[in-house]
Amino acid sequence: MTHLLSCKEFLQELNDFLDESLDPELRREIERHVTECPNCFVLCDTTKRTLRVFKGMDLHPVPPEVQQRLLQALQKKIAENKGIDPKALNDC
Amino acid sequence: MLKLSVSGGYEANLKGGLNRLNSCLSMASRLKGSLASWSFTRIYNLLPLPNLPSGRKHMPFAPRSVARAPTAALHWLNGGAISPATGLPRLSSLAAPPFDEAALVARAKAGDPSAFSELVTHYDRRVFRMAKQITQNDEDAEDVLQETFLKAYSHLDDFQGNSKFYTWLVRIAVNEALMKLRKRRSDKTVPLDDPIDTGEDVVAREIAVWEDDPEQLYGREELAEILNQAVEGLKPAYRTVFILRDIEEMSIEETADALGLSISAVKSRLLRARLQLREKLTRQFKRKGDDAFAFL
């Protein structure tokens, strides 16, 4: 006899369900639960869409000047490690 | 005067500066590797190129292409193709070598700075994005970015290779970012090791269907602002887990390793983060009017 999941059990398995890391039997139980429970259906659908909308966004590209300053800081560090006066780099 | 012809039909007259050029090449040669990249970029940006299209006084390498600059510059100087439309070298014709993290780390540990530069170029965007999302502050994110790579370079010998290099980098970045948060909120602590919760007290208060394509209702910047605010509203302990797992797409195991947490703690925090974000976005994206509860 198939075990009927409660909403609480559904919630505990929601992460693995969304990450598709559940074993097939438990997955089928979750799918059955969401077809029968409107609240959990909406919860599952909107959580899935939440993840999708975040994955689709490139929120913070690195500004070119920030990248440039990072490279300069590293060059300075590398030069110091190699015993070269970092000020000499400014002559280039 | 050094005169060069390039196949795109442009002629570049590199006037003077040869002593300066020699000095820079000498310096680049002494330092090898990444410094050569930097020096070449600096050299070619300093020299006047009068016959490039109007408004272009310097060889216009995009900042993201700094790592490719020496290759592209040599390609260009050797008569490589230049796009007539953009005045840029046809970078697509330059085959990029495959990224091999383990080999680059081994070379960097052996003292090859160009290998470390390649690691930086490969990961800087992800580290910055992560830092920005944790700190929610531009200046802090830049500091975190720099500190992360400077510390990684200084402590490269401590990296034993038990995890991926990127996971190790993330661990440094997260610690730096959380330290920034602690400094900014000097009256509070920002613990990464909050008591483990079971998720049982997670209550979904807002149950409503969304518009079919809510993302289309907002402009790109407006949507980014909504998402940023939603992430900012999470506690740092949940925010970091969400960022690593769902934005950076690290596995549960990698996230746990990077944050020094158990698998169950990561899963528990991830569930709370996801549900809280869902709750916040539902307020923005839910279907308006009577249809909002049509599923009931």
Image: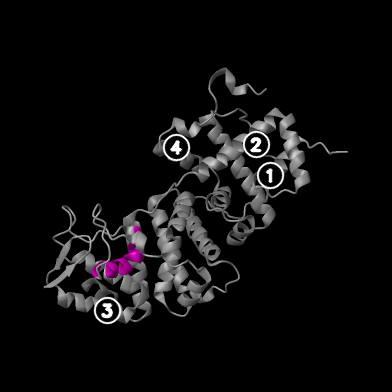
Tell me the amino acid under the disc marked 1: Phe
Among numbered discs 2 and 1, the one appearing first in the sequence: 1
Q: Name the residue under label 4.
A: B223
Magenta highlight on residue B75: yes
Label 4 with label 1: CB-CB less than 8 Å: no
Tell me the amino acid under the disc marked 4: Leu
Tell me the amino acid under the disc marked 3: Met
Residue nearest the observer in this picture, B110 or B212: B212
Q: In the image, residue A72 lies at what x, y percent? A: 32, 66
Indicate how the structure is coloured in the image: one colour
Q: How far apart are marks 4 and 2 (CA)?
A: 22 Å
Near mark 4 (Cα within 10 A), the count class, few <14, some 14-19 or many ≥20, is: some
Label 2 with label 1: CB-CB less than 8 Å: yes
Q: How far apart are marks 4 and 3 (CA)?
A: 47 Å
Residue nearest the observer in this picture, B59 or B227: B59
Q: Is the magenta stretch mostly helix, strand or loop?
A: helix
Tell me which chain the residue with mark 1 is part of.
Answer: A
Q: Mark 2 points at which residue?
A: A44
Rendering quarter of residue A43? top right
Q: Is mark 1 on a helix, strand or loop?
A: helix
Q: Distance between the residues labelled 2 and 3?
A: 59 Å
Q: Name the residue under label 1.
A: A17
Tell me which chain the residue with mark 4 is part of.
Answer: B
